[in-house]
């Protein structure tokens, strides 16, 4: 039996929206268990997975070491997303900090991720949102909380209007549940390096190839990237990493240093432009 935790927060209107849709659309049953004095709901899938839905009082990004309070193999955080441009969007991303932890987590600590789950979630997100005005995107690895179990954020962006739109909550609820039911895992596994925070080339890789990406270090964090962080990203991928995937043009002035780092670590690397021919 695989135990999966879907985490929402009382402080997060998008999370509440997604939670309400999960309870309404799927066969979640109220249990006698509570967390932060909030009722826990449970759903058992046909694949013998046990999914529990939690509502916590803290901000999600500061719910440090939640895996010590909740016994689960995978954590899915259903959350709001903010952007400077207030672009209507749906996003999915792994968590951890390539440098200083300004928004939860620990300085220079990457959290566990599943490339398989990220890929399936991203494909589902694109399928479920194709008839909307919303942009579906991966984001680079960022923010907290810190956990020792695989975790992913699935988000609605970027304003109160989008967070509270019931249809958006339905899209994310269906994306999460369809992904957790999916058993396909025949992918090559990679850690991504380079490119912008909203990962244009890695988005294409996830949708158009058999490559699944677990973590992404964006261009703006490359100056902080070192051998230890690369090793962390590999070691904290649930699946065995086959190679490092470089957004070649998105490496900027750090290109040679990154290549030298990978050569020193004797890691195979490939370029996105070679896969996307």
Image (cartoon, grey):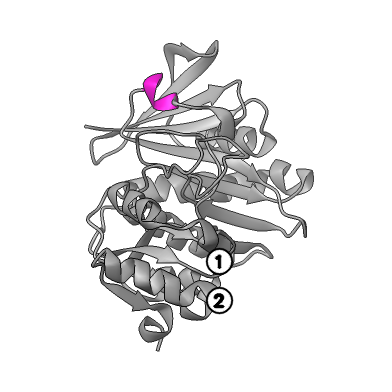
Choose the circle earlier in sequence order: 1 or 2: 1
The residue pinned by badge 1 equals 219
Q: Nearer the viewer, residue 37 or 150?
A: 150
- Of residues 221 and 40, which is closer to you in this image? 221
Query: What range of the chain is rendered magenta?
Result: 66-70
Residue 47 location (% of width, % of height): 24, 41
Numbered circle sitting on residue 186: none
In reply to whether residue 69 is colored magenta, the answer given is: yes
| Helix, strand or loop at mark 2 | helix
Numbered label attached to residue 252: 2
In depth, the one of 119 and 178 nearer the eye is: 119
Residue at image position (21%, 32%) is: 1
User: Element under label 1?
Assistant: helix
* Gap in angstroms between the C-alphas marked 1 and 2: 7 Å
Overall secondary structure of the magenta stretch?
Answer: helix
Q: Is residue 256 magenta?
A: no
> Compared with residue 12, is residue 136 higher up or lower down, i.e. above or below?
below
Q: Are marks 1 and 2 in contact (CB under 8 Å)?
A: yes
Q: Residues within 10 Å of mark 2 (few under 14, many from 20)?
A: some
Left or right: 21, with 67 as reference point: right
Residue 48 position within the rendered picture, expressed as x and y whole percent measured from the top left: 23, 36
- Lateral position of residue 16 relative to residue 251, left or right: right
């Amino acid at each position: 039996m695989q135990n999966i935790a879907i985490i929402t927060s009382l402080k997060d209107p998008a999370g509440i929206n997604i939670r309400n849709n999960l309870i309404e659309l799927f066969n979640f049953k109220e249990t006698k268990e509570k967390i932060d004095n909030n009722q826990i709901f449970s759903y058992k899938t046909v694949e013998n997975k046990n999914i529990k839905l939690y509502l916590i009082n803290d901000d999600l990004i500061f719910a440090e070491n939640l895996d010590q309070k909740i016994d689960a193999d995978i954590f899915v955080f259903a959350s709001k997303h903010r952007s400077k441009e207030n672009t209507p969007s749906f996003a999915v991303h792994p968590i951890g900090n390539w440098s200083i932890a300004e928004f939860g987590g620990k300085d220079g600590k990457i959290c566990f991720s599943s490339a398989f789950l990220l890929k399936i979630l991203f494909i589902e997100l694109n399928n479920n949102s194709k008839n909307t005005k919303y942009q579906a995107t991966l984001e680079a690895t960022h923010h907290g909380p810190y956990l020792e179990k695989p975790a992913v954020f699935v988000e609605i962006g970027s304003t109160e209007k989008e967070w509270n739109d019931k249809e958006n909550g339905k899209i994310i609820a269906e994306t999460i549940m369809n992904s957790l039911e999916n058993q396909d895992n025949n992918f090559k596994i990679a850690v991504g390096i380079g490119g912008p925070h909203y990962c244009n080339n890695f988005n294409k890789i996830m949708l158009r190839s058999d490559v699944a990406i677990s973590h992404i270090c964006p261009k703006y964090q490359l100056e902080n990237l070192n051998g230890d962080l690369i090793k962390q990203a590999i070691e904290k991928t649930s699946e065995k990493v086959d190679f490092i995937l470089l957004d070649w043009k998105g490496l900027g002035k750090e290109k040679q240093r990154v290549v030298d780092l990978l050569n020193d670590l004797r890691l195979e690397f490939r370029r996105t432009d070679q896969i996307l021919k």
